[in-house]
């Protein structure tokens, strides 16, 4: 199987390339022709070399090699043309999240892949955590009727290695864009029939006021679930300090009539202190979720029926993000009943 | 190459091993004096009626029986020309383990001891960090292991099991040696009351590092819990299996089945038994050597025997085979 990595703009590209390179029977090609858009940042043939993967000069050359699948790691606003190119070349697509920055782009990408008969999968690794499978079982039984849901996806601001994350044009926004979708995807996979009915969101730039996008963001959703409007709150802030011992984390608390479950898929770690960093030790040893994500993608490419976050789900999540921004602008909740059927 | 595993035993460890072998996709024949049929009905496999039948059909023998039978069963497999995976301890005594190892080495047959703690991801990650120099030179380490006392009677007959030191502490004695090197002396003290038994072992490593290993067989229903704290010249690594669960549940007064999995703590998603047996399997198929070898199993028993001697003598005791040259 031949897998192409299109762009190194999102640093997850390095993680994917590294993981793919050690899977027997998988050949990895990469290209990063827009590296010049990121002066002073890692990328291009040099990064491909460091990752030990073959490098192609540009997207056309990569697709001319007829990859079975591609992984698109361009800036959020640059996903659409690459997805359309890949679909036209008959390659299955794993696209970094969020799917896009406009609904028009997201819908066009979904349509292009459907028309070409290829899978469009969005890169949400957390749903592949074995702990989520366990939570799904609890949610289907002992938890009873769902009363409320509270999620967090907090992290360090990611602009140190990739400045585009705080460029409104390239990223589409800040912390709300970057982090809301991971929690939304979890809700989507745990309760596939649920739909967001309204979104209220607030944001500020008190952390890192030097950047042009929101660094703090909270959203309160009303989720139609089991015939009720379940309140869901999500903290999507880049609120871990630069010196924090790890990148961040994601949690979900589900309160039901039967009990309460707290999910913390990144919790497994060795703690302590390291003199070398002057910081807390934080050595995660849990299952590698990016590897589980790639495994699901490659199984889909091989023709297996695996439930994955697709273009429709990605578009739904993006609609909630866009509603959140509208709410931030207006200061009032935004009704999503019409956009999210 | 498709290998058939000949599993001997049908107790707690046999259950974990059978489940892991099945997940690894290999065929398993099971021989046991009791309990094989029930285990197979639940997890799969084929029952065989006698040991010789098992040795006749297996490509690899997996010994998951009470400790005092390990040595003889390993030698029986050897005489049938078969490689062996043997649950720890490799044998009831160091002398017996040494005889078994020498016979396997002479026959050039693989013999792998089941020191599964080396395969728990938190312990493997700690060892990797120590090896990479994350905390400099190890100075002092602490390991605790607590669980409800085993129920089978033989565990509580020290002549058969070697007591809590050889059965339970052996895991941490092996791990302490893996991170801090050979052990020169051991001092131990023990106490028992009302079915609860604790032992505390202090180790002096040849490097100068010190280790403190505590084991407890606690009252029935006590949750399985392990901790470690490894301090070196460049930092400290800590872990407590009771902390940072991936999933925390509170069902109030609603009775909900627990999420523990046999001998494993709750939420240990990647079965360390599967990781362990998978590594042994890969080695048997010509892959790299496993992270633990028979001589590691022997070294762990020697440390345990020094601790057992100390329990009797009240003195710090030298660990055989590691006397420091003067």
Image (cartoon, coloured by chain):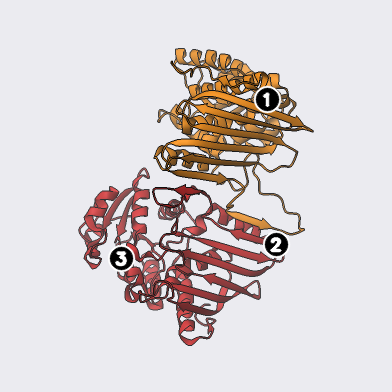
Chain colours: A red, B orange
Give the x, y percent position of residue B158.
Answer: 70, 22
Element type where label 2 sits in the image: loop
Q: Is residue A78 left or right of residue A301?
A: left
Q: Is residue A199 left or right of residue A53?
A: right
Q: Residue at x 55, y 52 (%)?
A: A130
Total marks in image: 3
Which quadrant holds the N terminus of chain B?
Answer: top left
Q: Earlier in the sequence, mark 2 or mark 3?
A: 3
In terms of depth relative to the viewer, which is nearer, B167 or B275?
B167
Q: Which mark is residue B163?
A: 1
The residues tagged by marks 2 and 1 sit, at their Cα atoms, a distance apart of: 41 Å
Give the x, y percent position of residue B210.
Answer: 52, 32
Give the x, y percent position of residue B234.
Answer: 42, 43
Give the x, y percent position of residue B261.
Answer: 64, 43
Picture quadrant where residue A246 is located? bottom left
Q: Residue at x 54, y 70 (%)?
A: A234
Q: Are marks 3 and 1 in contact (CB under 8 Å)?
A: no
Picture quadrant where residue A211 is located? bottom left
Which quadrant holds the C terminus of chain B?
Answer: top left
The residue carrying pointer 2 sits among few (fewer than 14), some (14 to 19) or many (20 or more) residues within 10 Å by Cα, namely: many
Output the chain of dot 1.
B
Output the chain of dot 3.
A
Image height of B83 relative to A60, above or below: above
Residue marked by disc 2: A259
Residue marked by disc 3: A88
């Amino acid at each position: 199987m031949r897998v192409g990595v299109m762009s190194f703009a999102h640093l997850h590209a390095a993680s994917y390339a590294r993981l793919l390179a050690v899977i027997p029977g998988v050949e990895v090609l990469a290209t990063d022709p827009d590296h010049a858009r990121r002066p002073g940042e890692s990328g291009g043939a040099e990064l491909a070399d460091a990752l030990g993967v073959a490098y192609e000069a540009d997207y056309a050359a990569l697709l001319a090699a007829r990859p079975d699948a591609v992984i698109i790691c361009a800036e959020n606003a640059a996903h659409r043309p690459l997805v359309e190119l890949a679909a036209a070349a008959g390659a299955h697509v794993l696209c970094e999240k969020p799917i896009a920055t406009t609904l028009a782009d997201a819908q066009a990408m979904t349509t292009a892949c459907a028309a070409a008969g290829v899978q469009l999968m969005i890169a949400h690794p957390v749903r592949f955590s074995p702990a989520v499978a366990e939570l799904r079982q609890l949610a289907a039984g002992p938890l009873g009727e769902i009363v409320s849901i509270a999620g967090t996806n907090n992290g360090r601001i990611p602009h140190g290695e990739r400045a585009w994350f705080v460029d409104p044009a390239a990223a589409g926004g800040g912390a709300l864009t970057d982090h809301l979708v991971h929690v939304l995807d979890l809700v989507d996979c745990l309760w596939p029939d649920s739909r967001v009915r309204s979104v209220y969101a607030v944001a500020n730039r008190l952390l890192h006021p030097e950047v042009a996008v929101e660094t703090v963001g909270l959203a309160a959703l009303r989720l139609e679930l089991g015939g009720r409007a379940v309140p869901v709150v999500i903290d999507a802030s880049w609120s871990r300090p630069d010196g924090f011992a790890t990148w961040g984390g994601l949690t979900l608390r589900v309160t039901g009539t039967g009990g309460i479950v707290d999910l913390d898929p990144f919790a497994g770690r060795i703690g302590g202190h390291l003199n070398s960093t002057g910081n807390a030790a934080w050595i995660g040893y849990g299952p590698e979720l990016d590897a589980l994500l790639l495994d699901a993608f490659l199984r889909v490419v091989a023709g297996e029926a695996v439930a994955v976050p697709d273009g429709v789900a990605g578009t739904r999540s993006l609609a909630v993000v866009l509603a959140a921004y509208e709410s931030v602008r207006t200061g009032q909740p935004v009704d999503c009943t019409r956009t999210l059927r | 190459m498709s290998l058939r595993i000949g599993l001997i035993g049908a107790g707690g460890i046999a259950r974990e091993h059978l489940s892991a072998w099945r997940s690894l996709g290999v065929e398993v024949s099971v021989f046991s004096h009791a309990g094989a049929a029930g285990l197979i009905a639940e997890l799969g496999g084929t029952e065989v009626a006698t040991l010789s039948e098992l040795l006749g059909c297996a490509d690899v023998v997996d010994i998951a029986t009470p400790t005092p039978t390990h040595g003889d069963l390993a030698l029986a497999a050897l005489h049938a020309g078969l490689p062996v995976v043997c649950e720890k301890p490799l044998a009831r005594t160091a002398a017996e383990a040494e005889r078994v190892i020498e016979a396997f080495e002479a026959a050039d047959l693989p013999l792998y001891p089941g020191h599964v703690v080396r395969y728990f991801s938190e312990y493997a990650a700690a060892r990797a960090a120590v090896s990479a120099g994350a905390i400099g030179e190890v100075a002092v380490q602490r390991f605790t292991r607590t669980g409800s006392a085993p129920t089978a009677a033989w565990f509580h007959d020290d002549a058969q099991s070697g007591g809590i030191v050889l059965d339970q502490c052996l895991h941490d004695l092996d791990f302490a040696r893996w991170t801090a090197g050979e052990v020169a002396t051991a001092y131990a003290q023990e106490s028992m009351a009302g079915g609860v038994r604790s032992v505390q072992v202090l180790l002096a490593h040849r490097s100068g590092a010190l280790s403190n290993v505590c084991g407890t067989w606690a009252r029935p229903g006590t949750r399985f819990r392990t901790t470690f704290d490894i301090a070196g010249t460049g930092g400290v690594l800590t872990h407590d299996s009771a902390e940072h669960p991936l999933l925390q549940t509170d069902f109030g007064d609603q009775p909900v089945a627990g999420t523990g999995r046999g001998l494993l703590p709750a939420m240990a998603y990647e079965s360390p038994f599967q990781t362990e047996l998978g590594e042994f399997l890969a080695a048997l198929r010509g892959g790299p050597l496993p992270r633990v070898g028979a001589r590691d199993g022997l070294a762990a028993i020697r440390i345990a025997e020094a601790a057992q001697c100390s329990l009797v003598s009240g003195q710090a005791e030298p660990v055989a085979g590691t006397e420091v040259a003067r």
